[in-house]
Amino acid sequence: MADDIQPDQPAPDMEKMADKILALIKKYNPVEVDGMDPTLHYLAPHVPKVRWTELGDLVAAREKTTFGSVDGARWMTLRLDGCGFSKAVRLMRRKGVLEPQGFSDVFADTMVSCLRLLLEHFSGAIGYTQSDEMVIFIPPASVVRGEQQGHARNGRVTKTASLAASLCTAHFVMELSARCITAGVGLEGLSQVLPHFDCRVGSFASWEEARSLLLWRAYDCSVNGVSDAVYHIPGSGKAVQSLGKREKVAWLHAHGHLPLPRHQAYGTVLAKVRRRVEGHNPKTGATVTTLRSVIERVDGPVLELARTDALYPKDDQV
């Protein structure tokens, strides 16, 4: 792993490690549970946990060593995580801000709304959210007349991280506040919790490198989403909660708890794409077709999208 590399050894190549994982995912078929319709829950082809851990260690090490400013020629990532959200969610359930038990659609919708806002504000190309975290992928800045431009705010890491965390926190609280007012629930629950986010910034030489972060977090969701579902089912017990992922899915199926909500099982991907739209030209009076950027949800489990090369939607052509 990253911490085990000696000074005279070359650092592990993150892109090559991600490529090896993708090669395994593409080589083998998705895992199936005996007697279960595979459409009820997707289980990606098996990749040893140690490989995911090694990839995650490399990504985390890259984030820790990203400081100063990120060069405009590189991909920039923002990884936001809820601070102390386990306690916060319990309090918000008791106060009626969120549903009393089980998977919370309110929480998931609010996270997706925050993801969309950050994609728009930071000109992100693709974003992913699962549980109480989200990741924004910001592509290299433009090259104008042969000169590489810089990222917004000159790619300053501290400035970008603090702005992303504060913007996400404010939007999250405002979204939940609006839902509380609509539902007739007092805002005391939120004022006592004060949910908030932190942010880590990463710098990557290419999309092939940056997607390592997306693959790692998607794998984490595939494990934790199932575990979370089992944990919140009354009577599941420690014996079931200690099972492996495949066995937990089999248990969920046997007890009629599949399919899980899609966001809980796989998370949500949003991507910025260019789509054809028809507009009116006031000068000529003609209807014209142009391309405009829109943010779309990309349906499907992330690891299956990566396996089938469908992770990033294609732009329309005029």
Image (cartoon, helix red, strand yellow):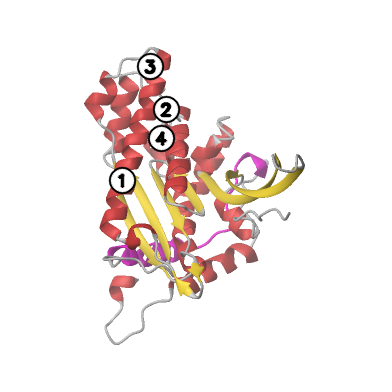
251 or 67: nearer the viewer: 67
Q: Which mark is residue 181?
A: 3
Q: Amino acid at mark 1?
A: Ala
For the N terminus, the image quarter is: bottom left
Q: Are marks 3 and 2 in contact (CB under 8 Å)?
A: no
Where is mark 2, residue-wise?
Answer: 235
Q: Quadrant of residue 69?
A: bottom left
**Residue drawn at (51%, 54%), measured in percent from left and top?**
125
Give the class, few, some or many, for how many residues have Cα within 10 Å of label 2's Cα (few <14, many ≥20): few
Give the class, few, some or many, for how many residues have Cα within 10 Å of label 3's Cα (few <14, many ≥20): few
Mark 2–mark 1 distance (CA, rounded to whole Å): 37 Å
Mark 1–mark 3 distance (CA, rounded to whole Å): 24 Å
Q: Quadrant of residue 241?
A: top left
User: Which of pointers 1 and 4 lies earlier in the amino acid sequence?
Assistant: 1
Where is mark 1, residue-wise?
Answer: 165
Mark 4–mark 3 distance (CA, rounded to whole Å): 30 Å
* Nearer the camera: disc 4 or disc 3: 3
Where is mark 4, residue-wise?
Answer: 231
